[in-house]
């Protein structure tokens, strides 16, 4: 292992658990290492451009690949054991992947989605009327918030009856946890920190109506992204949060944006270029791991 590999190992022993890679059609560069998945995801979102495509990998798994610590052929019986362990929990794959069983059998952390059933009116922390804007300033802007559903419904009706011209639709949403009001790409409508109960639609040029999106009295299944690890000897699963700290199955935690996770099977050593000791950016492609 050269200086680049040693730098990555030092980052791991210093408590870093995630590595951000600059992915492209050819060479891949190391952008930085982070303790919390949320910090790594924020970097990916902030620096995303047409030319630069950042993705997150588990640092420990990445180091194992670079050092060739990959077990041999996986038997069908082992795959069945993994599937059986998965079947005990209400979880699903976030993205279709042909190698997810191998990832778990390698002892790696693998992202999945926990399907948690909940009653909306008991789970919502705050009801918010928002403007879902279109045009030059897309996104959601908060207009009114309350802890009581009837008050939020009344506020929505008052906004509609005010006959003001809105640049977008009005939504009545329930905030399930602290987080952004905007949807995360690639996830279902119940996977984020909010659920939409009602929205407005234009019935004609001068009238706006209120349409129910989800009945507040009907339970929902909320998608909660988590990381999973499989223990081969015990044939058991364990669940982890964005800091790779173990949690109880079904526990609430900070949102994990898996749209920036790197689901490639592996990154070859020849694809990685990085100048040792330079944190925060790709400076050189001369040093190969």
Image (cartoon, rainbow, N blue to C red):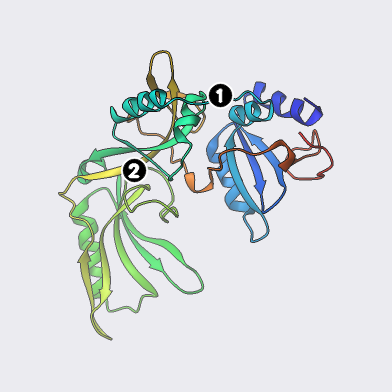
Establish if 198 lies above or below 10. below
Establish if 171 lies above or below 256. below
Name the image quarter holding residue 4.
top right
Q: Position of residue 10 (x, y in %)?
A: 72, 24
Query: Tag 1's secondary structure?
Result: loop
Q: Residues within 10 Å of mark 1 (few under 14, many from 20)?
A: few
Quadrant including the N terminus = top right
Describe residue 43's horizontal placement relative to residue 185 as left or right.
Answer: right
Describe residue 265's horizontal placement relative to residue 5 as left or right.
Answer: left
Establish if 276 lies above or below 200. above
Please indicate, yes or no, whether residue 166 appears anywhere in the rendered image. yes
Residue under pointer 2: 223
Which circle marks residue 72 in the picture? 1
Describe residue 71's horizontal placement relative to residue 118 as left or right.
Answer: right
Quadrant including the C terminus = top right
Question: Which residue is rendered at x = 37% and y = 19% of the image?
Answer: 236
């Amino acid at each position: 292992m050269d200086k680049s590999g040693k730098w990555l190992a030092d980052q791991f022993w210093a408590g870093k658990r995630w590595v951000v890679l600059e992915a492209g059609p050819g060479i891949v560069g190391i952008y930085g290492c982070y303790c919390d998945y949320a910090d790594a995801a924020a970097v990916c979102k902030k620096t995303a451009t047409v030319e630069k495509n950042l993705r997150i990998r588990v640092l420990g798994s990445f180091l194992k690949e670079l050092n060739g610590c990959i077990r041999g052929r996986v038997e069908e019986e082992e795959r069945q054991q993994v599937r059986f362990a998965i079947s005990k929990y209400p979880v699903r794959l976030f993205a279709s992947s042909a190698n997810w069983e191998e990832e778990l059998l390698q002892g790696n952390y693998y992202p999945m989605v926990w399907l948690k059933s909940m009653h909306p009116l008991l789970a919502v922390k705050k009801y918010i009327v928002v403007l879902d804007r279109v045009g030059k300033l897309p996104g959601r802007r908060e207009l009114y918030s309350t802890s009581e559903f009837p008050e939020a419904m009344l506020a929505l009706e008052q906004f509609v009856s005010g006959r003001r011209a809105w640049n977008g639709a009005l939504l009545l949403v329930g905030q399930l946890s602290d987080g952004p009001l905007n949807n995360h790409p690639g996830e279902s409508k119940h996977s984020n920190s909010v659920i939409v109960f009602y929205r407005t639609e234009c019935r004609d040029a001068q009238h706006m109506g209120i349409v129910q999106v989800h009945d507040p009295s009907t339970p929902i299944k909320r998608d909660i992204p988590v990381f999973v690890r499989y223990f081969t000897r015990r044939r058991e699963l364990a669940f982890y949060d964005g800091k790779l700290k173990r949690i109880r199955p079904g526990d609430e935690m900070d949102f994990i944006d898996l749209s920036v996770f790197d689901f490639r099977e592996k990154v070859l050593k020849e694809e990685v270029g990085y100048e040792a000791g330079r944190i925060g950016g790709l400076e050189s492609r001369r040093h190969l791991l």
